[in-house]
Amino acid sequence: MDPRISRVTLGVEDMKRSRAFYETLGWKASPQSNDDVTFFQAGGSIFGLYGRAGLADDANVEDTPSGFRGVALSYNARDRADVDAVLAEAVAAGAALVKEAEDAFWGGYSGYFADPDGHLWEVAHNPYWVIGEDGSMVLDPDA
Amino acid sequence: MDPRISRVTLGVEDMKRSRAFYETLGWKASPQSNDDVTFFQAGGSIFGLYGRAGLADDANVEDTPSGFRGVALSYNARDRADVDAVLAEAVAAGAALVKEAEDAFWGGYSGYFADPDGHLWEVAHNPYWVIGEDGSMVLDPDA
């Protein structure tokens, strides 16, 4: 199994609402999207929205209520001001501000928002990590 | 907010167990990893493991038990045989087989495993999507 994540799929209760949320953030839905699924190109991966019940069914698991999901997606911003700007942009688009950005013990600056279905996004600036021009992150450039 | 996912972080109960699971699949932990966090380079994104309680704390949310998380990561394989091989490899490494691979209504072939903490991975072959040599997926090459 090669080290890659081809797609991240979030289950959503209301496709129109969730699609509109990410589109308001400036993400462009692929023409391959339809009423049942929305795809966004996210770097070299695909970000997908799919009905929550349908995702449970597809995975052959029960659609029980979510507690803490134990999952966070992160958006690394290029500087601290951009962290604040992205959090504000998300809140303006309808996100819940889960944690205001603050200095993190690891030397960065980070906050969290939750999308309309409660999926967690960390927005962080990590001064030790470099974001490529194409948005990619490379941990150990010499490895 | 640019369309990118810098990092996907999964909360885990037992870092050694989870790190060993992904290493058994052939993923190479970054030297930046330590007892509290494990990072893997996954294409242009980072895949991270972090203590579940610590992740909840970092996000300022309660660490309640997970029901259906409403999240699935996908690994797109290059052909159908590779889907079966990756599912078998994951099970051999300690994953639970959640759904045997089967023909999907959308024309592909897909199954699911759950990692040691129950995080869902779909393993799929999609004959309509192309995987680049670097493992990236591009939805609409002409867009």
Image (cartoon, coloured by chain):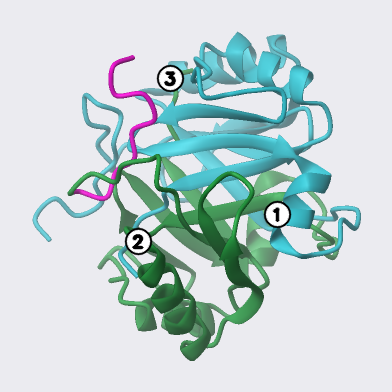
Chain colours: A green, B cyan
Marks 2 and 1: CB-CB under 8 Å?
no
Judge left or right: residue B141 versus residue B4. Answer: left
Of all residues, the one furthest to the right in this rendering is B65
Res. B101 visible in picture: yes
For label 1, count other residues whose C-alpha is less than 10 Å away and answer few (under 14), some (14-19) or many (20+).
few
What amino acid type is highlighted by mark number 2?
Asp
What amino acid type is highlighted by mark number 3?
Asp
Q: Indicate the position of residue A3 as horizontal and vertical percent values.
A: 44, 24
Q: Which residues are magenta?
A: A134-143
* C-alpha span from label 3 to label 1: 26 Å
Looking at the image, which residue is at 35% across and 61% down?
A79
Chain of residue at mark 2? A
Residue A113 vertical placement versus A110 (above, below) = below
Judge left or right: residue A101 versus residue B117. Answer: left
- Residue located beneath label 1 in the image: A57
Res. A122 visible in picture: no
**Who is closer to the viewer here, A31 or A140?**
A140
- Residue located beneath label 3 in the image: A2
Specify whether disc 2 shares its chain with disc 1: yes
Chain of residue at mark 1? A
For label 2, count other residues whose C-alpha is less than 10 Å away and answer few (under 14), some (14-19) or many (20+).
some
Report if residue A46 lies within the magenta region.
no
Looking at the image, which residue is at 49% across and 20% down?
B30
Residue B64, label in figure: none
- Residue located beneath label 2 in the image: A79
* C-alpha span from label 2 to label 3: 31 Å
